[in-house]
Image (tube, rainbow, N blue to C red):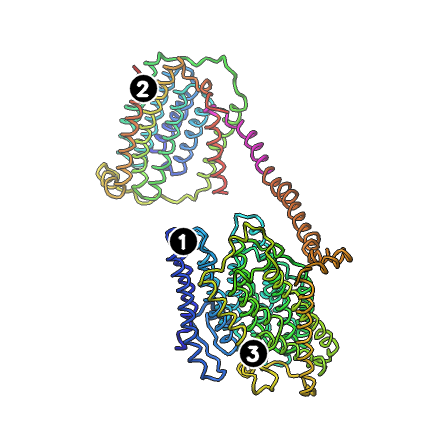
Amino acid sequence: MMAPSTVHFVILAALLFGIGAAGVLLRRSGIAILLGIELMLNAGNLALVAFARQHGSLDGQVFVFFVMAVAAAEVAVGLALLVAIFRKQQAIDVDRLAIMRW
Amino acid sequence: MVMAVFVVAAVLAVVSALAAVSHRDPVVNVLSLVVTFFCVAVCFALLGAHFLAAAQVLIYAGAILVLFLFVIMLLGAPQTANDEARRPVQRTAGLALAAIVVVGGALLALTMQAVPPAAPVGSNAHAIGTAMLTTHAFSFELVSVLLLAAMVGALVLVRRKQ
Amino acid sequence: MLNLLWLVLAFPLAGAVVLLAGARRFTHRTTAAVGVGATGLSLLVALGVLASYAGRHGEVVTQTLYRWIAAGDFSVEVAFRLDPLSAVMLFFVTFVGFLIHVYSTGYMHDEPPTAFARYFAYLNLFMFAMLTLVLGANLLVLFVGWEGVGLCSYLLIGFYFEKDWCAAAGKKAFVVNRIGDFGFLLAIFMAFKAFGTVDMAGLQAAMAADPAAAARWATPIALLLFVGAVGKSAQLPLYVWLPDAMAGPTPVSALIHAATMVTAGVYMVARTSFVYALSPTALLVVAVVGGLTAVFAATIGLAQNDIKKVLAYSTVSQLGYMFMGAGAGAFTAAIFHVFTHAFFKACLFLGSGSVIHACGGEQDMRKMGGLRHHMKATYWTFLVATLALAGIPVFAGFFSKDEILAKVFAAGAGNLHGYGKVYLVLWGLGVAGAFLTAFYMFRAVYMTFFGSFRGGPEAEHHLHESPGVMVWPLRILAAGSVVVGFVGIGFFGPRFNLFERFLHPVAPGVEVEGWHAGPALEVGLIALSVGVAVAGILLARRFYFGPDAGAIPARLATAWPRLYRTVANKYWVDEGYDAAIVRPTNRLAWWLWKGLDTVVIDGVLVSLAFFTEIAGDLLRFVQTGNVRNYALMVLGGAVAAAAWLLL
């Protein structure tokens, strides 16, 4: 049996990214949206690592590490926002946050 | 053998990802995502990135998702009510875009030439650390500033006004 | 000494710069010292240069300062050219200019210090520009001076710009001059296109080298140059600005609008005489325009009551004589008249300034009279200059005007270029003009200086002779009006005509072949022109002198009211221009403003703004405020960008 190639990993990454994007676009809960974003970031990480192996370079793995750090920062701020929003209107439904418009 | 591990991990990742984004209970969402992240960590390991696999488990599954759980518990695990307008355009367009991304990504991957991977590079913590602190030292410093800013920002956002 | 030529220009320029910079701080004394000093130094250097040039027998001396423009095979240098022609101009421009500067210190003394400094700054700047015009070695440098004097003329005519009509007069002078300048510019372009150079010497050489091209281009170039001269020298039909230019201070009228700037057109024709000499048509046009202007302006002068207006029309008329002479091919005679005219006309203007000064700003001759008892020096100098202008023998104007008339008659009798009859008619006009000139000038003398004062006892009490700084320039100019004519006595033949011999190398003139006036005919011609002058004087005496002064003209005016009003209103030329050109132009401008600018151009801009606003109004609905919509758009955009990059 053959070993999984880069193509396999990239297809898996695309699937995960699409699922994450669908979550971001379709869910109304702020927490679900943040989770979708995390999923998309992870899919990106997977693709990066796969390509890094393809090219025999370590840079891709370093990028992944940075992405993890950025994701951590994003989650910290995002969750803080959610807490602040929840305090204000006792819900985290983003569709009710439509005051910043025309 | 390797292929079998990959297939199992991949299928498990996709299924749990679907659960993570579609289930209505946020606790279930988070726990499903933990499973997905474990499977991704397995993939990292299969790709030879052992250090990243470890970091994935520690940072994502361990730290970030625990933070999510913590917030959910703090906010009382609110259920999303389904009483509001369903926004059919948003729904259709969102699904369509997600499908385009999946299909497009898959097609792109399939059109890639089946080049055999280059010789695997040494992927230990030592090599990554060296690369991070030499070649990418500037980005490393930037990330540290970003983390500091995020920390301050989070504190400011959740602070209660007296 | 000759290489100090540039200093002649540098002093007035420096004076103008210093005065403009210090206008707010200088006292009258400082301003006068700087202004008069700069012109005086310029005069001294000019005299030195001319003294060392005198021994050179008509040589052309060129001083190149630096290369101004170099573009491909087109190159222009800032260069000055001293030859007999520019030497004559250099002499009287600096000399008369200096005297008028001195005079101005007295005349303008009542102005506040800032205006006083501004006045002298403009006057110095004018000297610089005029000297650039005179000394310019190529058409472009000459044109710079040409525009410079136009600018200073505009500034000085509008010197009392608080008064609307003064500002309007300045504007009028500027706009009318632009019409002429346009022709001058076209002539420069054409000269460059045809001969590849704008340098005087180069142009002359190129025209000599290629007679065929010279014959083809001489007429258009000469006529376009003449358009410029018509504007600057106030000839028909562009003369209308000069009478209005009397709105400026009187010394300005003397310097710019009588002695120097307005003669620039004649100078330019003489400077480019090598072009005119090749074109009989252009010469004829010059002569006809000059002759018509000479008589036309003289008739208007008959009925003017403003002393400065009389002198202004007289200037237009005399400039007509100069062009008539130049048109008969006698460029030297024209320049000779420029030279003598500078002295006696400057003297007349300064004298009228002295009179106006004494009468407290009054310029209407009907409110003067009997002034010879109060201002002896002014009266005598004015009388001498008037005799010179009227063409009475031994005074300078006699020699130069007679020279012109003799040349025109010769051109007529000798059938120059086959246009003999035209030249004979022009000569007749010239003689008639001489009669009119003598008449209206003595009318002015009698109305101003004879009889009894008509301005009321209050004004009579204030009558006084002007101070020394004003009277001495008058005396010097009056003396000049007597003596400068002797340098160009044409009667005893060319050998004794020093002026013509001096100028001959640069402006040789067009020889009339196959005809020579015998001594009897020459004496007859002179007797005729002196006779008409005396007749004019006697008629003026009959009309305006004695107990019933002014009675006959008044009767004539009632007998032919329509004729009198036509002449007194200057043939309604200004009104005609107003109706035919000014108002249509204004109306066109109004339509362009209200129609093109407001409706079309503004309309396009406003509708652009309107559609931008509409687009914004519609597009802002995209901004739903819903985070998920934004995310959708971001992802859509990312996918589209990826598709664009990959496909």
Q: Nearer the viewer, residue C65 or C50?
A: C50
Q: Is residue C218 visible?
A: no
Q: Main secondary structure of the magenta part?
A: helix
Q: Is residue C250 left or right of residue C297?
A: left
Where does label 3 land, which residue? C204
Look at the numbered disc 1 and give the secondary structure of its residue: loop
> In x, y percent, where is residue B152?
28, 26
Q: Chain of mark 2?
A: B
- As displayed, is residue C348 above or below residue C56? above
Where does label 1 land, which residue? C23
Have a look at marks 2 and 3 and say if they share a chain: no
Q: Chain of mark 1?
A: C
Where does label 2 land, which residue? B158
Q: CA distance from mark 2 to mark 3?
A: 93 Å
Q: Chain of mark 3?
A: C
Q: Is residue C456 left or right of residue C544?
A: left
Residue at 44% x, 27% y: name it: A19
> In x, y percent, where is residue C336?
57, 76
> In x, y percent, where is residue B81?
45, 13
Amino acid type assigned to the residue bearing label 1 in the image: Ala
